[in-house]
Every structure is written in structure tokens, then in C-alpha cells.
Amino acid sequence: MILLGDIRSEIAKEIQRSILKTVDRYKKKKSYFMLVWAGIDIESGVIRTKIILFNKKPPKMLGTLLYFVDNRIGKIERIWALPLDIPIYEPSEEVIEEVLRSSKNMPILKS
């Protein structure tokens, strides 16, 4: 039986490996933003990681990490780590401060 803590631990390890591989691959690029998303396909058990590089800071997206990499001075800075939008099945009036703070200035996009 796979536990939620085990899945989170493996996703964290996969994200770390992917970030290190990307930073090494683009070490000649002066600076960039690196948007990271990772998730697991429950049926197959495969962890999927997506990393997208930007020259400018992208808009905030739930369930992502954003890093700024400056190869000129050898610095990596985490800009954000936004939580997933996980549905709450029981109605609640509780405001979760961390989620509220992370959504500040987040643009509303229509689809």
C-alpha cells in the first residue's frame, strides 16, 4: 500500500532531480524564471514533472513552484510555492491564511 507521505516524498525527490538537471542544462543562459509542476498518474504510478523556462516572470498558477535562476552570480531563488486547488467537500467558513496570502494579486483568467 502506498501512503500519501511516500508519494509526496517521491514527488519532492523527482522535482529536485528535474530542477538540478535543468539548471545544469541551461548554465550558459544568464538568467531565467523556471516554472515547475509535478503530479502523479495514480493508475500507472508515474510521476510527471513539467518545467517551463521564461525570460519574464509568468503569472501565478496554482500547484506550481517558481524559481529565479541567475547564473551570473550563481543564485537560485524560490519566488513562490503555490498550493493546489483541492476541493473541500464540507462547507466551511474558515479562511486559510496561507492560501489567502498566496493568492494576493493573482490575476483572474476566464476560460
Image: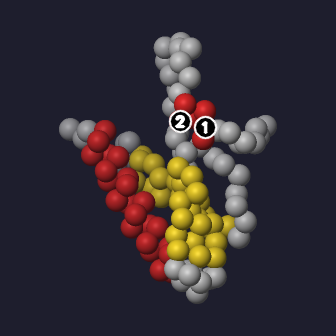
Across and down, in percent, residue 75 comes to: 53, 74
Regarding mark 1 in the picture, which secondary structure is present there? helix
**Can you see residue 102?**
yes
Q: Residue furthest right?
A: 110
Across and down, in percent, residue 111 comes to: 77, 38
> Left or right: where does residue 23 sit relative to residue 108?
left
Q: Quote the CA–CA distance across marks 1 and 2.
A: 5 Å
Q: Residue furthest bottom?
A: 28
Q: Look at 35% across and 46% down and name the residue there.
A: 8
Residue type, label 2: Glu
> Left or right: where does residue 47 sit relative to residue 83?
left
Across and down, in percent, residue 93 comes to: 56, 14
Vertical side of 54 occupied by 39: above or below: above
Regarding mark 2 in the picture, which secondary structure is present there? helix
Vertical side of 46 occupied by 18: above or below: below
Residue to which mark 1 is pinned:
101
Given residues 105 and 16, the one toward you in this image is 105
> Left or right: where does residue 57 sit relative to residue 98?
right
Across and down, in percent, residue 41 comes to: 42, 46
**Can you see residue 46?**
no
Specify few, some or many for label 1: CA neighbours under 10 Å numbering under 14, 14-19, or 20 or more: few
Vertical side of 30 occupied by 64: above or below: above
Q: Look at 70% across and 57% down and name the residue there.
A: 58
Contact, CB < 8 Å: mark 1 with mark 2?
yes
Residue type, label 1: Arg
Quadrant of the frame with the N terminus: top left
In the picture, the disc for residue 35 is none
Q: Quadrant of residue 108?
A: top right
Specify few, some or many for label 2: CA neighbours under 10 Å numbering under 14, 14-19, or 20 or more: few
Q: Look at 44% across and 67% down and name the residue there.
A: 18
Residue to which mark 2 is pinned:
98
Q: Look at 56% across and 34% down and name the residue there.
A: 99
